[in-house]
Amino acid sequence: MLAEPFDDPHVTVLVFTKTAGFRHDSIPDGIAAIQT
């Protein structure tokens, strides 16, 4: 089963990326993927 694309300009998403110590290198890539 595949989900249909959801394109609603009124939807907002909070992405919390604060870390304590170790910060994974893929976090910026994940943020960029969500923003597009």
Image (cartoon, rainbow, N blue to C red):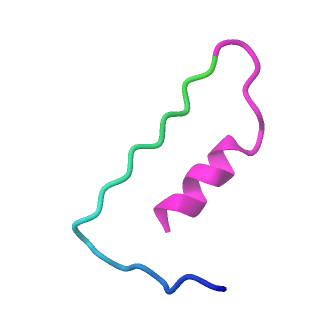
Q: Quadrant of residue 8?
A: bottom left
Position of 8 compared to 1: left or right? left
Give the magenta part as a residue range: 20-36
Instruction: Indicate the position of residue 36 as horizontal and vertical percent values.
Output: 50, 69
Residue at coordinates 36% horizontally, 79% vertically from top-left?
7
Position of residue 23 relative to residue 34, above or below, is above
> Which quadrant is the N terminus positioned in?
bottom right
Instruction: Indicate the position of residue 17 as horizontal and vertical percent values.
Output: 55, 33
Position of residue 20 relative to residue 4, above or below, is above
Residue at coordinates 22% horizontally, 67% vertically from top-left?
10
Q: Quadrant of residue 33?
A: bottom right
Number of numbered labels in the structure image: 0
Observer-nearest residue: 31 or 12? 12
Position of 5 compared to 31: left or right? left
* Extreme-left residue of the structure: 10
Q: Quadrant of residue 22?
A: top right
Instruction: Indicate the position of residue 5 as horizontal and vertical percent values.
Output: 48, 83
Residue at coordinates 65% horizontally, 13% vertically from top-left?
20
Position of residue 23 relative to residue 30, above or below, is above
Answer whether residue 6 is magenta in the image: no
Position of 28 compared to 10: left or right? right
* Extreme-front residue of the structure: 1
* Extreme-top residue of the structure: 21
Position of residue 16 relative to residue 2, above or below, is above
Residue at coordinates 39% horizontally, 44% vertically from top-left?
14
